[in-house]
Image (cartoon, helix red, strand yellow):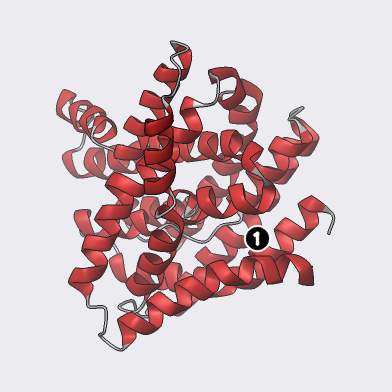
Amino acid sequence: MLAIFLKTLPFFALMGLGWGAGRLRFFPDVATEWLTRFVFYFALSAMLFRFTANLSLAEIFDPTFVLAYLTGCTVVYLLAFGVALARRVSIPEASVEAQCAVIGNTGFLGVPMLTMLLGPEAAGPVMMVLAVDLIVFSSLITLIITASREGHVSPRIVKVLVLGLLKNPMIVAMVAGLLWSGLKLPVPQPLEEFMTLLGAAATPGALFAIGASLASKSAERVSVAVWLSFCKLILHPAAVAVAALYIFDVNPFAAGVMIAAAALPVAGNVYILARHYGVAPQRVSASILISTVVSIVTVSAVIAWITGV
């Protein structure tokens, strides 16, 4: 495990550097916001397009893989949702807590880190995890909160969901790359080098932005945040591992990538959604902070387990 920990340490050190810059106000909130936009709309999108343009749909989409991941996620999602309701919180709050329990920082942390640590062949499985998170669970939380407030599911809600997916640059980049690959179009060398150069900024930019964003977060509602962090870092990868390894016949390497992706800390976009809907943003903020700090150890342990190091 020590060898894996030393390999993951530079990734978390970059996050620590961003956190320090944010705490010292050398990198203020507005700078973090613009850096995040650059990574989200340009660098990470370039990385995703380059990966998918060089892969076939068969290398990315595997129904068994998707079923295994969804099964593991659903178990933990329902558990977190049920525990929240047992505490007599509202349905929107329960949906936000359940989101914390299953949505990891796959885009900003998982894609760059896992493809570097596990090899470029990890790109397909980790992007499948990202696609499920974005399409299924981001839509689900929007549907639950909006329907709970309005009392029914209206065509307007469906329109909001569809437009949200179409406006997400990560989804657009992956779909564009798959279309490019499906049409068997060659990737011109200048375009390949441009995407490589721009995509290379995704890893340091995303990690620095994660750290800087954590500098403004506080650990309120600690007991709930600890529970949600436990769900995300321990129960989620465990449930996914059982589903992938014992229930569904998932390729061993792909299963390992899936488990590693499930072990990632709570994603920042959960906080964005919580703040957008005005539902428990402080609780989510604390969960992101605690899970990210603890993941320095737990992510290394999971990757060491799946790689046998």
| Residue drawn at the location 44% of the way across and 43% of the way down | 196
Residue 243 visible from this viewpoint: no
User: Would you say 151 lies left or right of 181 here?
Assistant: left
The percent coordinates of residue 309 (x first, y second) are 83, 59
User: Would you say 270 lies left or right of 240 here?
Assistant: left
Q: Within 10 angstroms of label 1, few (less than 14), some, or many (20 or more) residues?
A: some
Q: According to the image, label 1 marks what residue?
A: 234
272 vs 210, nearest the viewer: 210
| Residue drawn at the location 21% of the way across and 61% of the way down | 34
207 vs 106, nearest the viewer: 207
Which residue, as the protein is rendered here, is positioned at the far front? 190
| Residue drawn at the location 47% of the way across and 78% of the way down | 16
Which residue, as the protein is rendered here, is positioned at the far bottom? 24
User: Would you say 160 lies left or right of 191 here?
Assistant: left
Q: Is residue 35 above or below residue 98?
A: below
Q: Quadrant of residue 66?
A: top right
